Image: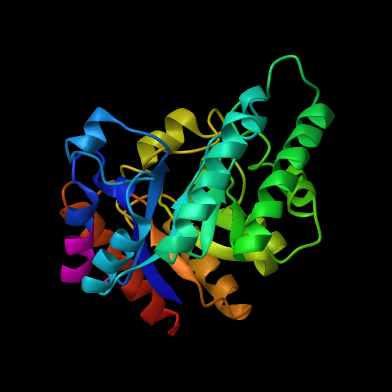
Amino acid sequence: MKIGFHTDAFNSSYWNFDQCLKWAQDNGVRFIECGAIDGVSWIHGLGYQPHVALWEDPIAVRRKMDDHGVQMSQIDAAFPLSLPTGSSLGVKYIINTIRWAHHAGCPIVDTTDDRYAPKGMTDKQAMEMMKRSYDQVLEVAQGYNMKINIEPHGYYTTNPDFMEEMLNFFDTPLLGLNMDTGNTFIAKQDPVAFLERFKHRVTHVHVKDVSQSLAESAMGEITGIPISHAAIGEGVNSDNIKKCLEILHSVGFDGVLSLECEGAGGPMIERSLEWLRDALKEKQIG
């Protein structure tokens, strides 16, 4: 298994993507994950956002990553496809991201749903709408040999029965799971049981702990954590994370474990990195 990180760790620090590459290089982290911006943003344009915009030259970004010895493990195009606008705005956003990711050397694009069931729709109607959206997305993904992940983050995706239906929308190896240890936990699912059920569909992992205070105040009330404010190993989800590592090891998972937590400008994510490296050694996982 390989270790990477999500650049949203540095949202609060207002770092840019270049600063994140430098942090990765300095800390011996060879894989990076970020969000896609389909358009322009003043905060990104001024250099205060650690994600990439699709107007940027993906070849130039790829060369920059090469210079730092870093590869992109996954790019987030997580516009919630369960919203009514998912079939219009969301699909176009994901397709544009697929094309950009291909040229940047990124093998996976991440997707998800909204935290609430869409108003005025039954679950069946919402699932049918999402299936049509993923059909369009996968048609383009096939041409680029791009994997499309579904991340547990919302009303449908954190429910294992709905997740199973979504992963089986189409019989293709291009549709997989981005496991998230923190989102499943805060949605009041058992991350270990969730992963065990879908262990053969996982192609990327978000490693995320949950603070005691957040668990006490929000568990079962929300379905996803935008960014964890507990260093990995310092929350109430760390034992589950270790068990998840064992499951992944048992099925020969050799993908990226992406640290997803508040970085606090470096120190917090560095503690997370140290904990994960120690946990892999403890479990004798290479």
Q: Kindly indicate the quadrant of the structure image that contains residue 72.
A: bottom left
How many numbered marks have been drawn onto this rendered protein structure?
Answer: 0
Measured as percent of width and height from the top left, residue 64 is found at 24, 65
Taking the spot 46% from the left edge, 57% from the top edge, the residue there is: 101
Above or below, 233 against 130 in this view is: below
Give the percent coordinates (x, y) of residue 272.
29, 60
Quadrant of the image containing the C terminus: bottom left
In the image, 238: left or right of 92?
left
Q: Position of residue 23 (x, y in %)?
A: 18, 61
Question: Where residue 246 appears, x then y in whole percent?
Answer: 54, 74
User: Which of 7 and 221 lies nearest the eye of the viewer?
Assistant: 7
Q: Is residue 74 left or right of residue 5?
A: right
Front position in the image: 211 or 208: 208
Q: Is 23 covered by the magenta stretch? A: yes
Instruction: Inspect this view and state whether residue 23 appears.
Output: yes
21 left or right, relative to 176: left
Q: Is residue 125 left or right of residue 133?
A: right
The residue positioned 22% from the left and 61% from the top of the image is 21
Say which quarter of the image contains residue 133.
top right
| Residue farthest along the top direction in this orientation | 120
**Residue at 66% from the left image edge and 47% from the top image edge:** 137
Asked if the stretch drawn in magenta spans residue 176, the answer is no
Magenta region, main secondary structure? helix
Image point (20%, 47%), residue name: 16
Q: Which residues are magenta?
A: 21-29
Residue 180 at least partly seen: no
- Above or below — where is 141 with respect to 157? below
The quarter of the displayed image where residue 134 is located: top right
Foreground of the two, 93 or 230:
93
Colour scheme in use? rainbow
